[in-house]
Amino acid sequence: MKQYQGYFIDLDGTVYRGKERIPAAARFIKRLQEHQREILFVTNNSTRSPKEVAANLRTNHDINVTAANVYTSAMATADYLVQHAGQKRRVYVIGERGLKDALLNKGMQLTDQDPDYVVVGLDRNVTYEQFKIATLCIRAGAVFIGTNGDTNLPSEEGMIPSAGALVELVRYATQQEPIMIGKPQKTIVEMALKASGLKKSEVLMVGDNYQTDVQAGINTGVDTLLVYTGLSKPADIEHAEIKPTYTVKTLDEWNV
Amino acid sequence: MKQYQGYFIDLDGTVYRGKERIPAAARFIKRLQEHQREILFVTNNSTRSPKEVAANLRTNHDINVTAANVYTSAMATADYLVQHAGQKRRVYVIGERGLKDALLNKGMQLTDQDPDYVVVGLDRNVTYEQFKIATLCIRAGAVFIGTNGDTNLPSEEGMIPSAGALVELVRYATQQEPIMIGKPQKTIVEMALKASGLKKSEVLMVGDNYQTDVQAGINTGVDTLLVYTGLSKPADIEHAEIKPTYTVKTLDEWNV
């Protein structure tokens, strides 16, 4: 079995299940750290800052990492814009603090007047007014970007609408296809590779979801490890045209 | 050319263009009235009451009709529920006054607790909270109904998101297909037939939009008249598999 220098690891379903711990995942991260592997948690969640994500892992899941170990779809969106936007840095955002801060940190200017880009992520306080502005700006020529296509966010109330649902409203009202950044798109993986300085061949994508985590690896040409502690079941990939590079029941099985 | 006793007539693009009058349409309505034809304005707009729609036609477009001449997707939704709901009358609504009043008028109980139905129409003050409730209720088993699939509402600011965009968010977040009521679905036409007591063969659907007005007629088996004063152009229907029964440049050409 090949050795990987870098691990791009999903969070929910892979490292924890909501508030529930996955002990094998904590042991896996510890073994990666003992072997000096590079760890990057690559998550579609754009609402939290890397600092908050790391604090949650340390406090609630016994996983000793820092903000530098976290790469969100918000950061990938900001890095994508830096790469493509040139002097066009006016951005209208539907999103929470995590997304807005990621864009501000990379020198974007947030505005609702004549933006060059409209970025839509999850905003749990979104209103019609914001959808209206996004729609009018895109119809006036702004480039439409979606942080990720997730259908739902697990919450204590149940499966509530996530970023993809908000993107879908704007897609329907503009009849324009967005540029999508998060998994299963390759953009987030390419931006994570660039941010980490790792090569495709050095990295293993680890996740519980064939449709997002594994597909993102396949789309980018990065090897994949599907772990059956979350969404995907063995039956789900039986008829998949391209299988994950590896599958395990729990991350205890993986030899780092 | 066949004579029709009843006319189901679209509004925007057919009878007026936003605030702009279409004089041939006013003359057409007058001729229908002189010949004692039955007139029903059948509109996907669910935000206004029939009274408001009629008042607008009288005040701004010189068309002398009453609320009894108006049939909205909100009324069709209420009539559909009366027909299907039986004792299940608990409804969670995303929508404006026109939709809520139509449902209340037919004995529905509006609630956000364990509804039997979730009805989504245009609400220009909708918030994430409402989308969340709709999503959780549908995921818990409520039947999902959309008033209509319109992408946009023309406004003074431009083409803003309409009912279909809001429905689309909920569809994506629930991964469930809604029952749609408005044009091009046949439900609104069937409910209008029932409400008016007219037979399919007695009615002509009149509208400017092949995709909604004419398709609704085709789907229901009602003859159609496409008028080129709005959205559809002759080139749009050149390759249509099923053509409108009749086409005219303006409604002056139509012999009532």
Image (cartoon, coloured by chain):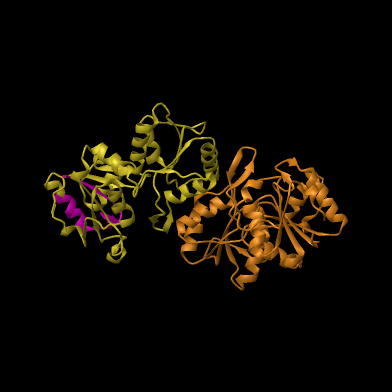
Chain colours: A yellow, B orange
| Residue A28 covered by magenta stretch | yes
**Residue B238 location (% of width, % of height):** 63, 50
The residue positioned farthest toward the bottom in the image shown: B86
Q: Residue at x 11, y 47 (%)?
A: A35
Q: Which image quadrant: the N terminus of chain B? A: bottom right
User: Which of A8 and B225 lies nearest the eye of the viewer?
Assistant: B225
The residue positioned farthest toward the right in the image shown: B34
Q: Residue at x 30, y 59 (%)?
A: A241
Q: Is residue B198 visible?
A: yes
User: Which of B234 and B191 lies nearest the eye of the viewer?
Assistant: B234
Q: Which image quadrant: the C terminus of chain B? A: bottom right
**Residue A6 location (% of width, % of height):** 19, 45
The residue positioned farthest toward the front in the image shown: B238
Taking the image as shown, residue B172 lies to the left or right of residue B23, namely: left
The residue positioned farthest toward the left in the image shown: A35
**Residue B191 location (% of width, % of height):** 68, 65
Q: Which residues are magenta?
A: A5-31
Q: Is residue A44 above or below residue A232?
A: above
Taking the image as shown, residue A201 lies to the left or right of residue A179, namely: left
**Residue B34 location (% of width, % of height):** 88, 55
Quarter occupied by residue B182: bottom right
